[in-house]
Amino acid sequence: MNSSNNIVGVIVVTCRLGKYVESCLDSLNKQTYSRLEIVVVDNSLSQNLRRTLLKNYPSIKLYSSPKNLSYCNSLNIGISLTQTEFVLCLNDDVILDSQFIEKGLGGFSIEPRIGMVSGKVLRWDKVTLDTIGLFLSAWRTAYERGYGIKDKGQFQKQGYIFGVNGAVAFYRRIMLEEIKEGDNYFDSDFCFFYEDLDVAWRAQHKGWKGYYVPEAIAYHLRGGSTRKLQGIGKPYARLYLNEELQAHLLKNRYIVLIKNESLLGFLLHIPFLLFYEIMVWSYILTLRPHQIKLFFRNFIYIKSALRKRRKIRQAHISELPL
């Protein structure tokens, strides 16, 4: 497949925390691959930002939401506004190297079942790795390979990965359409966190693959869109999240497990799961006891995940050959 003639849809989600979105859009304008359809989903509720973006970036499609949408809902709207064969989903705190899209498209050309491509994503200091591919950890959490270590050229080999980080997520549309749940590409129950692992896990169940291309370079201000100022770029995200985001982080791990984990996988990983639960709930009980009430208030999402699991399993059975 020759992907050099395809238009790439780029979805940029912003809520105007800092002036990140302009830097992101400037980096898109400098891409060596110019066949782009850029959609900005603006959750800032600011007429000034709307006017500024339309004036300075007249070629973009701008969706100004009347309310502050979650990241998942924003991406679903943005993707629905494009019909392109490839879709690049971006946080506004991401800056792309000028060859990112050109090199990233090369990853899809390796084989038709590659539905997700990750580049080498560094922090804004350009020396610390942020992610070079998403993997499923023994704790059944999202493991970011390379997270927080210095880039010394040790990850220059292309290869298969489990999925891609949601901040810089390059997808093949046909894969997104195949794993779509109703009208949602991204499960809107997640809001923030774990939505990228859910997409990757659902895609893997359908036989899709992820691929890492180190020549596709991007820079991400880790936490720029979600954390308090003093927590930007630092590890242990839980320490810097407000109560609402902390609640999403807590519930979403259970949602992704309920929807995607097999019985065998669950049994094999029980020791790791128990250890992780002890660590997380020790933190909650000690430092964030208010989260207990929020967790039970969010139990409706757990029930929703159980219903979705049943639908996923029924669909899988119906696809088996007779």
Image: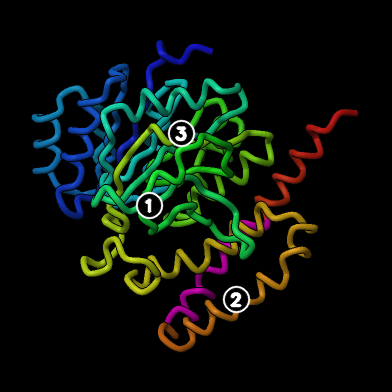
**Kind of residue sitting beneath label 3:** Val
Q: State left or right for residue 109 relative to residue 22.
A: right
| Image point (31%, 65%), residue name | 234
Could you give the CA–CA distance between mark 1 and mark 2, rounded to whole angstroms?
25 Å
Name the residue tied to disc 1.
Answer: 130
Query: Tag 2's secondary structure?
Result: helix
| Image point (46%, 33%), residue name | 213
Quadrant of res 136: bottom right
- Report the front residue among 249 and 293: 249
**Kind of residue sitting beneath label 1:** Asp
Residue 9 appears anywhere in the view: yes
Quadrant of res 286: bottom left
Quarter the N terminus occupies: top right
Secondary structure, magenta segment, majority class? helix
Name the residue tied to disc 2.
Answer: 277
Q: Which residues are drawn in magenta?
A: 290-306
Q: Position of residue 207 (x, y in %)?
A: 68, 34
Name the residue tied to disc 3.
Answer: 213
Quarter the C terminus occupies: top right
| Image point (52%, 20%), residue name | 109
Please state which of the two labelled residues, at mark 3 or mark 2, is closer to the viewer: 3
